[in-house]
Every structure is written in C-alpha cells, then in structure tokens.
Amino acid sequence: MLRSSLRLPQPFRRAASTAGPGRRLLLSTPIFYANGPPHIGHLYSALLADALHRHRGLRGAGPSRLSTGTDEHGLKIQQAAAAAGTSPPELCARISALFHQAFTQAAISFTDFIRTSEPRHCQAVCHFWAALQDRGALYKGTYEGWYCTAEEGFLPESQLTERVDAQGCAHKVSVESGHEVHWTKEENYMFKLSAFQDPLQKWLRDNPRAISPEPFYQRVLCWLGEDLPDLSISRERSRLQWGIPVPRDPTQTIYVWVDALVNYLSVLGYPESHGEWWPAAHHVVGKDILRFHAVYWPALLMAAGLSPPERIFVHSHWTVRGQKMSKSLGNVIDPFACNERYTVDGFRYFLLRQGVPERDCDYYDEKVVKIVNSELADALGGLLNRSTAPGINPSNTYPCFSETCFPKVVDYRGTEALGRAAAEDYEFVVSVASLPLQVAGYFDHFQIYKALECIALCVRQTNGFFQRHKPWKLDRKDPAEKLWLDTILHVTLECLRVYGTLLQPVIPHTADKLLSRLAVEPEERGISGLTFLPRYNGKPCPFEGRQLGPDTGVLFHRLEKSSQHQIERKRL
Ligand code: ME8
C-alpha cells in the first residue's frame, strides 16, 4: 500500500557553498563488514581515498574530511558471531579495532571512523527512515525471492546460476560472489525504487563525471535501462535481531544496506549539520558494491529530499597470484604483515602504483620487491644519495644555479648549445615543469597510478641527466667547472624537491625525509604554490645557498628478496 503520493525530486543543482575553490568536501571509503579482519583490498580502498584527501589538502583546495569505519549490523555479522561462539557486539568491537589499527598503521589520514552500532549513527538512520516514510517512498508488502546472506540482498534470476556439490545436489548460487541463495518469503517494507528510474538516468546524463572510471559509468547507465524493481528494505525481526528496528514498528529490522549507506550522512552530523557539506561527497568504492552506491543510494537520497553524491570513484579487485582472495582458499593477504615486510610507504607505493581502477590487479611478493626496490630505493633514493654525497657537495648546501651554464632559450630544438646544457636537458626540464599540473589532472580523474608513472619517468630522466653530465668528474677548484657542477646539482635537487612534494600523498614518511634533507620547511611543501627551477626563468630561488638537512641516512632501504616469505594470513 502506498502511504501517500511519492514526491519526486527536482533537477539537482549544486549548492552555492559547494561550488568553486575553497569548498568543503567529504571523501569516504566503504565501511567494512566487521565479520573478519582487514585484508589488502580494504587497505587499497582506504589508500585511494587517503591519497585523494592528502593531495587535496596539499593543494589548499578547502576543508575536507575523510571518513571510514565498520559496518556492524545484519545477518552476516549475526551468523559470524554465532560461528565464532561470541556475541555480535563483542565480535564487532574486536574486528572494528583491527580495521582502526590497520588504517592508523598505514597512515590513512581519516578524520572520522564510524561504527554503525554507535548511537549517533542509529539516530541518523531513524531520521532518514522517517524522511523516506514522510515523503511517501515506502510501502509494506510481501516479498519473496532468492536471498544471499553473504551479499545481504535479494537477487533476481539473472544474477543466479547453479552449482552441483560433491553429493550431486544442485544449489542456486550468486553469479557475482558464488555464494548460495535461499528462497525467502516475508513481509517487508518496500522502497519505491522503480519510481526513480527516470530521475536516476537524468542525474547521470547531466553529470557525466558522477561515476569514474568511464566503463563503470556506462555499466550503471546500462542497469538503469533495465527493469528496476522496488527494493525490500527491512527484514522480519524474528529472523534478524542484530540491526536497527524500524521506527514505530519493532517487528521489523532496517535492511543493513540502508543502515550502512546512511553512514555517509551520520559522519556529517545528519540531520543537524550535514547541510554544510552534503552533497559535496566523493565515495571511493569497490566494483562489487557499485549498484548499491550508484543506484540505490542516489535513489534513497532523492527520496529523502537530498541530492545524490557528487562523485563515485570505483576500483576493481586485487587478486593473489591470479586467484580471487578468499578465506576458504586461505590466500587472504594481511595488511599488517605487508607493512612489516615492505614498510608502510613501500606497500602504499606498490598498491597505488600498480593498482589500476579499471581492471583487476594481481599481487605477489616478487612484484612488490621489484617495483619498490627499483623505483624507491634505487631511482629516487640513489639520486638523492648521489647528488648530496659529501664528495660531490662538500659544503652540504643547496647549490647555486648559473644562467651562463643553463641559459634560457625560447626554442631549444635545433639551437646551437649556448651554455653547457644540451637539447635533451631542456626537454627534460620542460617535462618536470609540467609534472605538478599533470599529476593534479590524474588525481582529478582518479588515475593515481598514472600520476605515479609520470613521476617515476621523470625520476628516471633526472638520473639520466645526472649520469650524462658526470658531475663527479668535474673539478670544483676550476671556477668554470664549479659553476656547471653546482648547476647540475641545483637542477637535480630542484627535481627531487618537486618529486618529494608530489609524492607526499602516497609515501608520506619517505617524502618527509626527502624534503627535510633538502631543507624544505613544512610551509614550503604545498602543491598549489609549487615552483620548479625559478632561476631558469630569472626569478629568485629561496633554497639556493641553504644548509641541507642533517639526516644523511639512506632514503629507502632495499627490500630483501625472499623465496618463501609468508604473509598470507593463517586461518583465524
Ligand atoms: O561491502 N580488492 O563491506 P566489505 C580490492 N559493508 N578491494 C576490495 C577487495 C579486493 N579483493 N575485497 C574487498 C561491504 N575490497 C559493505 C560496504 S558501504 C556503505 C558498505 C574493498 O567488508 C572494496 O572497497 O565486503 C569493496 O567494495 C569493499 O572492500 C567491500 O568490503
């Protein structure tokens, strides 16, 4: 029965307070089920959101928050607690603390860690439910269908397949997760999702950047072209006690996905203070929960009188030696062990450098060791070491640049060398100068791996520049040679300063060490005011002549190769 006629949304205009520079922004990760400890897939989502958050902070783009947390209600948790011989609150407290610890250890800069069992969240969910009800978006009906506990949802026939077990019995399972489904019939509250097909399509057509990368945007548009049945959004309390009761109807429990999605509002103080932030929200989610975030969540928001989130960033999955990570296969990779084995920054770098949101990526130990050793220890660390070594830079200062050695030329192609710099040096300087803008563009497009690829390429080019001119062969006592030697070192340190600044969102500890060695003060580490080689353009360089930082230690220690390093989690 429809309670009253449903109020459909007006076209969504962005609120004035959320437009332009200096605006607020909420970045979020999914909230993770508290039925098992964190693995590297969870860490990857958090790292993507963290890098976006840190990059935005360094750009001075306006206040931002990063929320994460744990999803603690539902049948899945109820059953996991029973299987572990404990109560849901005890299990949730233990697992939630592990997520908090894993993210803190990995330097995730979250500003809010929400648990759905907290009172502030339960109040927000009840208010949200009342808003749906008051606006006529809910009705009570009998629902029957195939329910998948692992996915916490009813699945249509199109998402089911059959699997025959060892005894020859056929079972219906979910195509997506492979988990068994059970025929379930019960009286539920239904959400009038079908009424939102047109508004959702319009929202996406008007906001082509709402879902990135593009293939996921297309996938959602495709879903919206199909039948969009109403959604059951409560469960009988007799079947599910571990959850928030439906306001004014204690025989029903609110569906865990409605409960969970509202976390993005609870962290903003909904229903009191969310208005200063919402809808300036960017959600980072895995592809497995795209439908919930790109179809159900925007529809629920519209139905409650709110705008859909501004952007949804979707990423694919990590596999392990080509296999899906799963507890039953025993190949779940433990983030604590990885941080220990590869260091926090080493593992952050690997996941963000190798993770490509559009496609599944494979993890294996040798790959991490190879990439981290070649790009962080050898290329970046080696360059810092070579350009600051006492033998080459005995005064331990930021050396001076000479315009005579590296004169400014309008078009370096085909010009006779005027100073000591060659045409390829000019080309390389141009590519480093364009790096901050390029990196910012890649972050905006959720292509952090491409930003890192560009930085790694520039680091290689800087090593090439250094190698080409062999500064260690120049005689410091000869005034002309000294000018050129100092210029080579100045250009190299300027490059390192740019790389250190741009790498802060990805490898915060290593970048800090690098910038401190280069005597870059904390207030000089922003990305928006980042200059490169101002002396080349006739402007003063504040670093020239500065004493370098005292820590002359190795920037990044090489990782040892290990044939049998055991970081796959033992069954818990
Ligand atoms: O779905 N590779 O929680 P969840 C990369 N509570 N990322 C992975 C991954 C993998 N192999 N496996 C998981 C839930 N993830 C709900 C979310 S949000 C309102 C509620 C990441 O514990 C990825 O972000 O099953 C995926 O979407 C999420 O963990 C699912 O975590």
Image (cartoon, grey):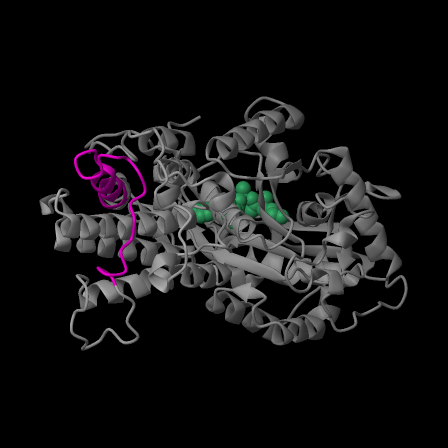
Q: Residue furthest left?
A: 473
Q: Closest to the observer: 76 or 421?
A: 421
Q: Is residue 384 magenta?
A: yes
Q: Is residue 336 magenta?
A: no
Q: Is residue 31 left or right of residue 450?
A: right
Q: Is residue 142 visible?
A: yes
153 lies above or below 559: below
Q: Is residue 558 left or right of residue 128?
A: left
The answer to which quarter of the image holds residue 120 is top right
Q: Is residue 277 left or right of residue 8?
A: left
225 lies above or below 267: below
Q: Position of residue 482 (x, y in %)?
A: 18, 47
Q: Closest to the observer: 462 or 102?
A: 462
Q: Residue furthest front?
A: 479
Q: Position of residue 153 (x, y in %)?
A: 62, 51
Q: Position of residue 95 (x, y in %)?
A: 56, 29
Q: Position of residue 195 (x, y in %)?
A: 75, 70
User: Which residue is depicted at the point 86% across and 61% down?
Assistant: 135
Q: Which residues are magenta?
A: 378-406
User: Magenta region, mostly helix, strand or loop?
Assistant: loop
The answer to which quarter of the image holds residue 24 is bottom right
The quarter of the image holding the C terminus is top left
Q: Is residue 15 visible?
A: no
The quarter of the image holding the N terminus is bottom right
Q: Closest to the observer: 369 or 563?
A: 369
User: Which residue is depicted at the point 21% across and 59% down?
Assistant: 405
**Circle count:** 0
Q: Closest to the observer: 537 or 132?
A: 537
